[in-house]
Amino acid sequence: MEFHSKDYGFFLVTVFSLFWLVAGRRRPRNAVLLLASWFFYASWKAPYLALILGSTLLDWWAGGVLARLPAEDPACRRTRRWVLLASLAGNLGALAVFKYYNFFRANFEDLFAGFGIHLPASELALPVGISFYTFQTLSYTIDIYRGELKPARNLREFALFVAFFPQLVAGPIVRAKDFLPQLERRPFLDVENLKRGLYRIAEGLGKKVLIADVLAVHLVDPVFAPGSQAGPLHSLLGVYGYAMQIYCDFAGYSDIAIGSALLFGFKIPENFKAPYLARSIQDFWRRWHISLSTWLRDYLYIPLGGNRRGPVRTYVNLMATMLLGGLWHGAAWRFVFWGGLHGAWLAVNRWWQRRGFGALPGPLGRVLATVLTFHLVCLAWVFFRASDLQSAFAVLGRIFGEGAALPSLPLSVWVALGLGYGTHLLPERIKAGAERLHGRMPAFVLGLFWSFYLGLLAYSMVEGVPFIYFQF
């Protein structure tokens, strides 16, 4: 059930109606959302609902046991570590089986090719969103282990935290400390919240349908296709196009998720803050996929030692975190290479700061820093998008090849590029003003706007372009 499909529209309206009918009572309203969330996930592949249920029961049990065993009691420390290990093994084990088994199997066979070792291949399909809800439940158990969180009030509410449908499939990754308290408050049908939610949904649909999908089909896919003969400018435009495609695709999903949650009175975290305006790689990761970057910081980088053990260890920790972050995105060396590039650039960024060098001075310096950062990010995107490392280097080779002819592209591509980068560069006050304008529209005008807008989306929609992050 894609967010930009008619099915999701009908589903959202139905759940919205049922939820607000029983919103005055805590158990019924949470039951409506939980059952709707399970139905939403089962619509992709019903048997894999068992994975979410298994992860839910495992971490509900682990959280409860950890909460009952006092951390300050030496006799309980070993048991607490074993319980945490069980949670880690269960969740990461599911990832290993469904997402990484074939990757490690192929590399193991290549490494020991001379011995004729062959392992059976897995035919299991990758469950949608497994990387997201796995990290979400892990954060719950780890936070209880650290003494930073109390367990959920009951299993039903914990299950809703794990499966809440707006952000279940592709984030943002929500922390229990932010979500669970919202279940305790009685929601009210706030007109302002409804308009804000509708605006975010409209914004996300526009990013996905009018920009990301158009760029994917008419520019990016042909440039990155095997055997592509795209010239230098065409290839360069393909890279710029992919940078905007993946942003609009993923940020568009996050917008729809945030907007959908607002319709039910829930606030989930922002995931993007104009990432291509970043002035350093460090700044980029404060703006891009914020819920993942903060998760990696809090549960991987800092436990590894962060920047507390000297410069060399800091660089090693940065590289290790980003290599694993790359592997989180996909079971392929191109994702690891992508993570390694970002890890190396973050290490250089930290070295620059340790040397006492500041930002480039003046407006021109800020522009140069932004342009440099953007192109470093684009260089890494080539490896992220290409089918393998060889194809990535082939795209880079074409960019630096001979020829300067401007490619013949459909008008829709130029419009999508202009719309994408143009809106990305808009100051926040203008974006906020557009949202306020939507909120002040009378009901009749708002109805006309949505009628026209949905018609435009239906006319512009490109079939068969799923959200990119569904594969992760």
Image (cartoon, grey):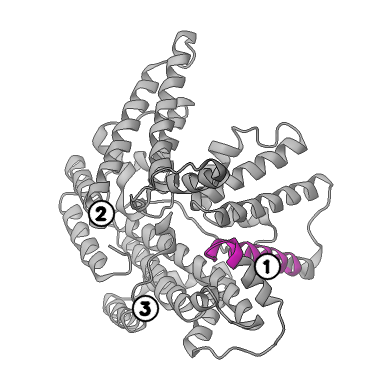
Within the magenta stretch, is there residue 334?
Answer: no
Residue ID at (66%, 71%): 396
Point out the residue furthest to the top here: 75
* Residue interval drawn in magenta: 367-391
Q: Check disc 1 and report the residue beneath it.
A: 375
Q: Position of residue 299 (x, y in %)?
A: 53, 37
Q: Earlier in the sequence, mark 3 or mark 1?
A: 1
The span from disc 3 to disc 2 (Cα, nearest Å) is: 23 Å
Q: Check disc 3 and report the residue beneath it.
A: 462
Question: What amino acid is labelled 2 in the image?
Answer: Lys
Kindly indicate the quadrant of the structure image that contains residue 302.
top right
Within the magenta stretch, is there residue 389?
Answer: yes
Question: What is the magenta segment's predominant secondary structure?
Answer: helix
Question: What amino acid is labelled 1 in the image?
Answer: His
Q: Position of residue 376 (x, y in %)?
A: 68, 63
Kindly indicate the quadrant of the structure image that contains residue 160.
top left
For label 2, count other residues whose C-alpha is less than 10 Å away and answer few (under 14), some (14-19) or many (20+).
few
Pointer 2 with pointer 1, Cβ within 8 A: no
Q: Secondary structure at mark 3?
A: loop
Q: Does residue 250 appear left or right of residue 189 in this picture?
A: right
